[in-house]
Image (cartoon, rainbow, N blue to C red):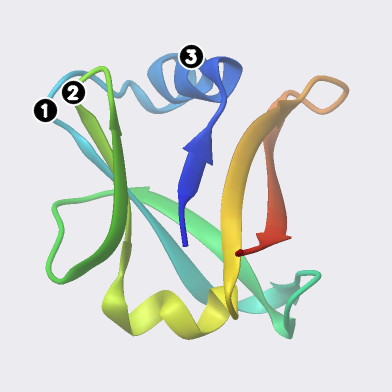
C-alpha cells in the first residue's frame, strides 16, 4: 500500500491547513458519510503526531501517514490524494494495490 499526494494537494495542505516542514498529516477512518470502500465510513484528515505508523510518505519534510489501526479501511488499496478544482477541496481515489 502507498500514499500518493499530488503537487496540488501538497499546496492545498499548506494553504488550507497551514502545514509546514516538520508537521504530520494523518488520514483516518471516521464514522459517518460513505466512500467507495465502505458505506457508513469516510476518510478524515488531521494534523497530529503519529502513534503507530503503518504507511507513510514524506514530501517537503511533511509526513503523510496512516496508523495501523486504520489499515482496515483501505482494504488493500493505495490512497491517491488530489484536488477537486470545481469544489476546491481534497479528492481521494482508491486504487487496488498490486
- Residue at the location (55% across, 25% down)? 9
For this view, does 44 lie left or right of residue 42? left
What residue is at 43 percent from the left and 78 percent from the top? 71
Q: Are marks 2 and 3 in contact (CB under 8 Å)?
A: no
Q: Residue furthest front?
A: 98
Q: Check the image and name the residue furthest to the right.
A: 86
- Is 85 rendered above or below residue 75? above
Badge 2 element:
loop
Q: Which residue is mark 1?
A: 22
Q: Position of residue 88 (x, y in %)?
A: 73, 23
Q: Who is closer to the viewer here, 5 or 18?
A: 5
**Which residue is disc 3 drawn over?**
11
Residue 17 lies in quadrant:
top left
Residue 76 in percent (x, y) is at 58, 76
Classify the position of the C terminus by image quarter: bottom right
- Identify the image quadrant of residue 31: bottom right
Residue visible at 60% across and 64% down in the picture? 97
Q: Which residue is mark 2?
A: 61
Q: Nearer the viewer, mark 1 or mark 2?
A: 2
| Mark 3 neighbour class, 10 Å CA radius: few under 14, some 14 to 19, many 20 or more | some
Residue at point 61%, 44% (across, down): 80
Marks 2 and 3, how far apart in space? 13 Å
Image x and y of residue 55, in percent: 32, 60
Gap between marks 1 and 2 measured at Cα: 6 Å
- Label 1 Cα crowd, 10 Å radius (few <14 / some 14-19 / many 20+): few
Nearer-N-terminus badge (1/3): 3
Amino acid at each position: 500500500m502507498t500514499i500518493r499526494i499530488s503537487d496540488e494537494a501538497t499546496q492545498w495542505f499548506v494553504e488550507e491547513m497551514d502545514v509546514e516542514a516538520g508537521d504530520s498529516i494523518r488520514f483516518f477512518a471516521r464514522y459517518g458519510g460513505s466512500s467507495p470502500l465502505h458505506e457508513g465510513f469516510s476518510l478524515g484528515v488531521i494534523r497530529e503526531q503519529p502513534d503507530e505508523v503503518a504507511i507513510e510518505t514524506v514530501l517537503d519534510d511533511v509526513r503523510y501517514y496512516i496508523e495501523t489501526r486504520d489499515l482496515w479501511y483501505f482494504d488493500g488499496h493505495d490512497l491517491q490524494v488530489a484536488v477537486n478544482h470545481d469544489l476546491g477541496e481534497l479528492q481521494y481515489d482508491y486504487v487496488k494495490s498490486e
